[in-house]
Image (cartoon, rainbow, N blue to C red):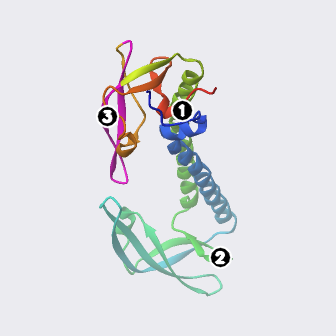
């Protein structure tokens, strides 16, 4: 008897997720975050142009801080401590993370230019285009992220539609299991496997990724059902049986 893993058709959206579409959804979710950051930096740049006051800040200290990220790489943060007084005489002690080059050319005890907002003196710039540059960079990342999201959306979406079309209109055939192929994909430190088969025409095919334990009941020469699509067949265990 042919073996199946679903007793009803798998919805298109679920196939899309299974085929890697989840990654594009994450990327699409990041686009508005980058856009919001870019807009916030632009509004701040406009405020500095309209309200900002230039002054001088004394470099009171500078230091480097090393951390280790999840990949084990060392990340070095360069920070300078600054002291300045506003036009009203308010004493402000602030700090700012800076680039390595700026850190190296900044000496403790030196005076450097600084522009602040009189209404919020803890908001300051060390260069006139600081916020506008940040706005442009995040806007670029938003655009790049959106383009990558579209590309990563297209491929799994096309595959999911092809699978649904094959289930709905393709020839329903019997195929014979030839084995299980371990992939290079790991989830929670566990490899994923694909069921492989041979069709009546002699053509070979393989399933989507599965946990090995989900394929334990399938042995070589077991019969399975596949649906013929354009260029390949789709296993009923992945896409579900044809409705009706």
Where the C terminus falls, by quadrant? top right
Upstream in the sequence, badge 1 or badge 2?
A: 2
Q: Report how far apart the C-alphas of labels 3 and 2 lie in the structure.
A: 64 Å
Q: Which x, y percent locates residue 11? A: 60, 36
- Tell me how many marks there are: 3
Q: Report how far apart the C-alphas of labels 1 and 3 lie in the structure.
A: 20 Å
Residue 8 magenta: no
Residue 185 magenta: yes
Where the N terminus falls, by quadrant? top left
Q: Residue at x 41, y 77 (%)?
A: 110
Residue 120 numbered mark, or none = 2
- Say whether residue 105 is visible: no
Q: Which x, y percent locates residue 219? A: 32, 33
Q: In this rendering, would 184 be left or right of 85?
A: left
In terms of image quadrants, where is residue 166?
Answer: top right
Tell me the residue that label 3 is attached to.
180
Asked whether the beta carbons under mark 1 and mark 3 sit within 8 Å of each other, the answer is no
Where disc 3 sits, the SS reads strand
Where disc 2 sits, the SS reads strand
Instruction: Find the magenta span and give its range.
Output: 177-201
**Crowding at label 1, few (<14), some or many (≥20) Cα neighbours within 10 Å?**
many
Q: Which x, y percent locates residue 116? A: 60, 73
Upstream in the sequence, badge 3 or badge 2?
A: 2
Tell me the residue that label 1 is attached to.
240
- Say whether residue 2 is visible: yes
**Magenta: predominant secondary structure element?**
strand
Q: Is residue 174 above or below residue 123?
A: above
Where disc 1 sits, the SS reads loop
Q: Report how far apart the C-alphas of labels 1 and 2 lie in the structure.
A: 61 Å
């Amino acid at each position: 008897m042919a073996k199946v893993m679903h007793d009803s058709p798998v919805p298109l959206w679920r196939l899309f997720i299974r085929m890697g579409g989840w990654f594009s959804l994450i990327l699409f979710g990041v686009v508005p975050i980058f856009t919001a950051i870019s807009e916030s930096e632009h509004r701040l740049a406009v405020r500095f142009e309209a309200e900002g006051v230039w002054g001088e800040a004394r470099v009171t200290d500078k230091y480097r801080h090393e951390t280790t990220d999840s990949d084990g790489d060392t990340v070095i943060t360069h920070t300078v401590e600054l002291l300045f007084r506003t036009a009203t005489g308010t004493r402000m002690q602030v700090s700012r993370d800076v680039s390595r080059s700026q850190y190296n050319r900044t000496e403790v005890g030196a005076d450097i230019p600084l522009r602040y907002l009189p209404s919020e003196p803890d908001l300051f710039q060390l260069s006139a285009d600081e916020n506008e540059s940040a706005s442009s960079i995040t806007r670029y990342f938003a655009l790049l992220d959106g383009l990558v999201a579209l590309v990563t959306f297209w491929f799994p979406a096309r595959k999911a539609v092809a699978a649904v079309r094959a289930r709905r209109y393709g020839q329903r055939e019997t195929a014979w299991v030839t084995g299980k192929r371990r992939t290079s994909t790991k989830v929670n430190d566990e490899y994923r496997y694909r069921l492989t088969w041979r069709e009546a025409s002699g053509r070979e095919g393989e399933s989507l990724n599965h946990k090995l334990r989900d394929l334990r009941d399938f042995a070589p020469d077991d019969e399975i059902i596949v649906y013929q699509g354009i260029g390949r067949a789709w296993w009923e265990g992945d896409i579900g049986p044809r409705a009706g």
